[in-house]
Amino acid sequence: YLNQWEEKFGGKNIETRFNKTAKQLNDEEWNIILSEFKSSVQDLSNEFNVSTVVISGGIVDKQKSRISKILSDISTSKVVFSELEDTVGIYGGFAIIRSRQK
């Protein structure tokens, strides 16, 4: 899932897809991306049957208010933002390493 999300919602893909940087996107273009983002969160929640989905990364850091609006009506899981911002990957990696050492 993470690779698919990076391919779909990562800054480089946004630049390639819209032929401009994420900062240059207009509201209509952001609505397209965020609609797809919402569907992906719902799919993830349904597939793994989790009570909480934690999201982070550049799109969250830079578009938090827009994402909050579109994710507020997801009923399958509680959606929260990581407080670790872009360092979440480092902490996740450490957690995986630690769990495999036991």
Image (spheres, grey):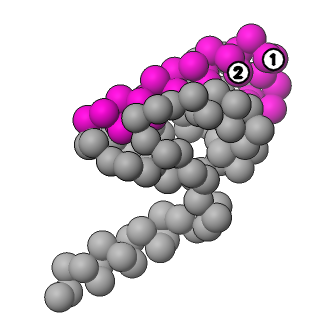
Residue stretch rendered in magenta on the structure: 21-47
Numbered disc 1: secondary structure = loop
Label 1 vs label 2: CA separation? 6 Å
* Residue 29: image location, x then y, percent: 70, 15
Q: Residue at x 38, y 71 (%)?
A: 93
Q: For mark 2, what is the residue? A: 30
Q: Which residue in the rendered view is the most extreme toward the bottom?
A: 102
Between residues 3 and 48, which one lies in front from this camera angle? 48
Q: Could you say which disc has been placed on residue 93 in the image?
A: none
Q: Is residue 23 left or right of residue 11?
A: right
Q: For mark 1, what is the residue? A: 26
Q: Residue at x 80, y 32 (%)?
A: 23
Q: Residue at x 53, y 65 (%)?
A: 88
Look at the image and tell me in which quarter the C terminus lies. bottom left
User: For residue 24, which quarter of the picture?
Assistant: top right
* Residue 35: image location, x then y, percent: 57, 19
